Amino acid sequence: MAGIQDAQQAEVPAICNSCEARRAGLCGAFNNRQLADLAKASSRHEILAGTDLPDDGTYSNLLSGVVKLTRNLSDGRQQIVGFHFAPDFLGRPFEAKRPIKAEALTNMALCSFPRAIVDQMTNEVPELGRLLLRRALNELDDARDWMAALGRKTASEKVASFLLMFAGHIGPSRHPADSISFDLPLTRGEIADFLGLTIETVSREFSRLRVDGAIRIVNKRHISLASIAQLEERCGD
Amino acid sequence: MAGIQDAQQAEVPAICNSCEARRAGLCGAFNNRQLADLAKASSRHEILAGTDLPDDGTYSNLLSGVVKLTRNLSDGRQQIVGFHFAPDFLGRPFEAKRPIKAEALTNMALCSFPRAIVDQMTNEVPELGRLLLRRALNELDDARDWMAALGRKTASEKVASFLLMFAGHIGPSRHPADSISFDLPLTRGEIADFLGLTIETVSREFSRLRVDGAIRIVNKRHISLASIAQLEERCGD
DNA sequence: CGTTTTCTTGAAGGCCCTCAAGAGAGGTGG
DNA sequence: CCACCTCTCTTGAGGGCCTTCAAGAAAACG
């Protein structure tokens, strides 16, 4: 009884107080006591855009920024196989069968924990395990969505789908039918590597969407979705 | 102490005695007592090839057979996004964002449990949660591998990769360099739906591999991998 | 302001798709 | 057992979508 009260009454660590990760990230699984224990072992980092994230065995909450995950064929061909947006968490339990490289696309803020502490907590906090599983399954759904796009959509549909997906994660959540405007932290080449296309094809499809009034290209990197309805029509599913 | 002895001394249910799922499937997480409890609620089924697997909220160990997972675009275009081979388990915790259809490609044997029992056991058996997570992450690795194939490999490389992947799951584990022979439980159309190609292209690539001596097409459905080294060379990674 | 990188646009080519016809395998009933 | 049907697979010819190759424009950077 006293233990339970301790857990409830322990104060939320100051650093966690307004942290998005408590609402939608890893830390939603913990009570105040556990959060306090974890906060003692945690550390915040800033990462610059373009930095490779080493697989050094830590878990991190991604507080802000975007990460790309890439897989390479032996001759240099490259495929982006996923993205992480805040407040995802980064770091992989167990070892992967294949090497996947993670790189910061924007400047990022991380809150990191030693792996051992989190792994141990999965024994004590079933909710944590469920959360990790739910995340993994969501990533699996996303990967399979993009399998369908890579295998069966046209270049035009791929680009439209990509813009809508990215806007959903990056853009400020406007009224659904309204226009959304956001910075694309990807080069045309990276978009091509995600969609299984070439730079030139991506560029041509952007131009076509601009001419047709579906998007405005404010800047090479800044896109405004002028007609979301039109994009949804073109996205093939 | 008595409780622990109970758990150790409880007998393995007869039906589980030689079950592959205990070694490599879901049931490796349980001790004898837990296995006995679970066995009471389990039921075995036989499923015929071609049957759709309803998402009825049960978990199952796939004891034998192959399952395909498909995702459809609105206009009928189809993409196979994954397979299940014995001794995988079937059934998904939490709900999926997108509908994915599961269909038996061969006759199958299942050992099924009510979802509630397994979900409850995840609270008591941390190893079960770890196992579910490990499985999900392996499926994620596979999906990302195929994203790279769909986006960046040529038709020829896709077919070679597919044959090697399938042989690894289906074929009797021969000496690595030896020839492997197995039944392909897929039509050319299904292979095409997995590789993002057309039936005709898949057929042409099979013919080319046969002419080049990499495979022998014993029967439309029965393939013999004559030169695994040659297939690996053609597989692009 | 010059250099470098990224992006855009055009022209031509190739890989895979579409369309088409025939071959092969399996099943059924006579 | 064979005729007949159906379904799948194979193979060829032609076309289209995307790529490749190329050159110039627009940013980004020092």
Image (cartoon, coloured by chain):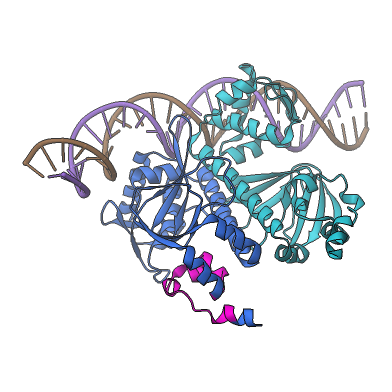
Chain colours: A blue, B cyan, C brown, D purple
User: In the rendering, at what x and y percent does residue B84 appear?
Assistant: 70, 45
User: In the rendering, at what x and y percent does residue B30 appear?
Assistant: 78, 55
Q: In this rendering, would A99 be left or right of B124? A: left
Using the rendered view, name the quadrant where residue A9 is placed: bottom right
From this viewpoint, is residue A197 visible? yes
Say which of B162 and A93 sits in front. Answer: A93
Taking the view exactly as shown, the residue that stands out farthest to the front is B1
Region in magenta = A6-32
Q: Main secondary structure of the magenta part?
A: helix
Residue A233, magenta (yes or no): no
Q: Is residue A93 above or below residue D16?
A: below
Which residue occupies 38% across, 67% down?
A: A172
Q: Is residue A115 above or below residue B214?
A: below
Which residue occupies 80% across, 48% down?
A: B22
In the rendered image, the quadrant that contains the N terminus of chain B is bottom right
Q: How many numbered marks are there?
A: 0
User: In the rendering, at what x and y percent does residue A125 appear?
Assistant: 63, 67
From this viewpoint, is residue A64 visible? no
Which residue occupies 62% across, 57% down?
A: B99
Q: In this rendering, would A115 be left or right of B53? A: left
Residue A30, magenta (yes or no): yes
Which residue occupies 26% across, 57% down?
A: A218
Q: In this rendering, would B150 be left or right of A184? A: right
Say which of A53 and B111 sits in front. Answer: A53
Q: Is residue B46 above or below residue A15?
A: above
Q: Is residue A67 above or below residue D4?
A: below
User: In the rendering, at what x and y percent does residue A171 appear?
Assistant: 38, 63
